[in-house]
Image (cartoon, helix red, strand yellow):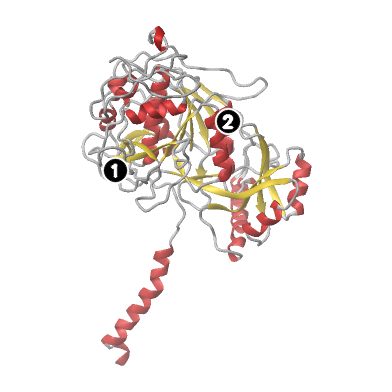
Amino acid sequence: MSSTSPLNFARSVAMLIAVALPAFAIGDLSAHAQAMMRSPNINIPSRVPSINPGTAMRAPPPTGMALRPILPNARLAPHLQASCDPVDRSASGECLDRPSATGHGQGRRTQGKSDKGSSAKVTQRREPKAAAAVDLRTIANEIVAEIDDSLSTDQADALARRHGLQRIGSQRFPLIGATIGLFRITDRRSVQAVSRALAADARVRSVQPNYRYTLQQQNAAPVEGDPAQYALAKLRLPEAHRLAQGSNVTIAVIDSGVDLRHPEFADASFDVFDALGGDEGPDVHGTGIAGVIVSHKRLMGSAPYARIIAIRAFGMAKKGGGPESSSYVILKALDYAALHGAQIVNMSFAGPKDAVIERAIAAVAAKGVVMVAAAGNAGAKSPPLYPAGNPNVIAVSATDDRDQLLPASNRGNYIALAAPGAGIFLPAPDGKYQIISGTSFSAAYVSGLAALVLERNPALKPETVRTVLTRTARDLGTPGRDDLFGAGEADALAAVQAVVSPQDAPAAAAPSAGLQAEPAPARELRPAAVTEASPAGDALRPAQQ
């Protein structure tokens, strides 16, 4: 009977709790796509005011490419790498730089091949766990290195073999003027040890981990009121669209796959590029982000007639969870966006500070491209996440329908402004709709507002666009700038009213004169005229009201 005494029973329970707690405490610390999403069955009438569509920008695919567009208004850009079977994919989801199992690089495979490739992949990725603790900020056993531009493919492979590595891929990136290689560790050595050895090679200029990036969405929470309407009213989008709709402005969306067949995109102008390769279908996140910007049937996007470069850089993680990407793939995406005319780059993802991506962002900024990023969904105690933490990027936090900060939203002195991001009603794949939350969608709204500003005056520099958006924002929280909302909640109408288009500017306000506005206090939101300053500076000066 002593074994069933209250004292022994209590001890047994305490031991069980002590064993169980570490499992709950450790969990999976990787930053997955944190989605607040539910898929409602909602029929809503058209809410879009009468707007004359801008002329879609279309061009045929490059000569000699056998491409078939998904939609008549979509252009498909070639993959940087061929699509491939699972056995030929890296841990970060990319095609390896070798022929696929089919021999044609087209991703055609039987179920047997797919199953065999998947099981082989799991075996390869389990081995390194015994060697060292897993860094969940990085792609396991992968290294990104800048190598000598003169190396041929065979020489790059020989370099990899000399260091006990497998070259997954390498290419020249004009954006940063460098050749970057992606390598996999094929034995049990740590990333740190291999990086030190590789960095000592005369043909290697820099080495870093292949960092992991995740999309910034959250699991759904109940919302009150009509989720299809509150963001539009908060941003004053219907009124702003009487002045600008984003026509002739190109926004690169670096995200997961977009369902181009959705009715909301029926007349939208898309250019499509897949930085991953493969045959993965559209995703709720990428479709939702595109919907924030260019929806124009039952829903209203922030810039419904902007041109979108839909860059798929996020694919489903091999071990489950939401879509993720890596340093090497994000570099491909930024390189493509900069070389194909993007005026704005939307980055609704987050990860650690990353030397190669910081270098790429500096190069994109030098080209005069506006960059917008989600602040992140890691909460109040999180350090800055990137690329939002980069000073060249407009970092956006998320608000709800009561102008409260989304609890999961990051905060800090790097936040530029806020926009609605809680319970946003958006398109989803297969013609469906979704209610979803996260700083991802706040960033996309601001990217659309930047397009409205640039439609009014395409000559504006990125820093001037930032100034227009922040100085016309509606102050929230503590009076003045704060770490939760930055300058306040974005205001589309005030922003477009603050910009004088070149044809409307008086002669004295020609670009060489640099006439700009000193905006009114944020709460008053009086229109102010803004044109681009002279190359010597972007100082704002009072304009006639």
Q: Is residue 68 above or below residue 284?
A: above
Q: Residue 529 placed where, x, y %?
A: 34, 17
* Quarter of the figure with residue 154: top right
Q: How many marks?
A: 2
Which of these two is toward me, 161 or 443?
Answer: 443
Indicate the secondary structure of the residue bearing disc 1: loop
Q: Residue at x 58, y 56 (%)?
A: 122
Kindly report which numbered mark, 1 or 2, lies closer to the viewer in this rendering. Answer: 1
Residue type at tag 1: Leu
Residue 463 visible to the viewer: yes
Instruction: Give the residue number, with chain letter if any, for mark 2.
Output: 336
Q: CA distance from mark 1 to mark 2?
A: 34 Å
Mark on residue 405? 1
Across and down, in percent, residue 192 comes to: 63, 58
**Residue at the farthest top position:** 507
Quick one: quadrant of the N terminus? bottom left
The reply to whether residue 91 is in sight is: no
Residue drawn where x is 78% and y is 43% of the image = 155
Pick the residue in front: 368 or 329.
368
Residue 398's spot in the image, x, y percent?
33, 40
Q: Is residue 451 left or right of residue 102?
A: left
